[in-house]
Image: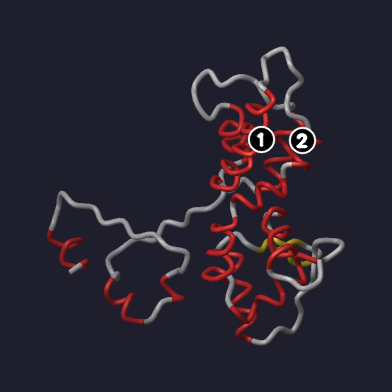
Amino acid sequence: MLRGIMQHRKRVTVLLTGVHGLAELPPVWAATLVSTTAIALGPLERADAALLVEQPVPDFPNVYAPAAVAAILDATACQPFLLQIYCSVLVDELNRRRWHAEDAPIGIEDVAHAADAAVDRAENYFLDMWGNAVPPCARDLVRRLARSESAVVRIDDTADDLAQAVLALERRHIVTRTPAGHKLTAPLFARYVRSSQSVRP
């Protein structure tokens, strides 16, 4: 049905979204979607993410110190949903304080203080990531990355299934490869793993 719609309905565009790439799905999907184009979506560019934080709606007041904006971008790795969650926690706190333009802006200490609340508010998102985007064979590795003092772990001579899982985590922007090794892309997700998916903090 999908292929028939895509081939014969000139005024209809079909858009399918998901975390799994075509290579990760059963072979029947490759045949069904043979005439489609895959478009990878990922985090925002840093400048666009900063704009989303500072100006989520027109005429939004200047509530963030520059260092606070940088801290939010770092904690979320510029992932749009995490940005919105983190900022909603911070703005809710400003509203609770009845903040006015002459008051001090959100600082880096406020961002650090809001991290646990942001993780709590994003719990459903993180549960979905853990259950659907992190392959079971890679969960111990993700826990180790979340607990790593340096936040970087070198992955050498891995079994083929783990190697494939790590590549999938890279495609999904959960893990980032650096010259020193691999690390979790978003520190906020690492905080979730330490608090909710790991016996040791």
Specify the farthest residue to the bottom: 159
Q: How many marks?
A: 2
Asked whether the residues under the numbered discs 1 and 2 touch, taking CB atoms below 8 Å apart as contact, a structural biologist would say yes
Vertical placement of 102 versus 74: above or below? above
**Residue 136: numbered disc:** none
For label 2, the crowd category at 10 Å Cα-Cα, with few meaning under 14, some 14 to 19 and many 20 or more, is some
Q: Position of residue 19 (x, y in %)?
A: 47, 64
Residue that numbered label 1 is attached to: 90
16 on left or right of 114: left
Residue at image point 57% right, 64% down: 127
Q: Position of residue 167 (x, y in %)?
A: 60, 71
Q: Position of residue 137 (x, y in %)?
A: 63, 81
Specify the farthest residue to the top: 102
Specify the farthest residue to the right: 149
Residue at image point 56% right, 41% down: 84
Quadrant in the picture for residue 165: bottom right
The amino acid on which the numbered mark 2 sits, given as a three-letter code, is Asp
> In terms of secondary structure, where does tag 2 sit?
helix
For label 1, the crowd category at 10 Å Cα-Cα, with few meaning under 14, some 14 to 19 and many 20 or more, is many
> In terms of secondary structure, where does tag 1 sit?
helix
Quadrant in the picture for residue 46: top right
Q: Position of residue 63 (x, y in %)?
A: 67, 24
Quadrant of the image for the C terminus?
Answer: bottom right
Vertical placement of 6 versus 163: above or below? above
66 on left or right of 56: right
Quadrant in the picture for residue 39: bottom left
The numbered mark, 1 or 2, whose residue comes first in the sequence reads 1
The amino acid on which the numbered mark 1 sits, given as a three-letter code, is Leu
Residue at image point 72% right, 54% down: 187
The Cα atoms of the two marked residues, 1 and 2, are separated by 8 Å
Residue that numbered label 2 is attached to: 110
Residue at image point 17% right, 69% down: 1
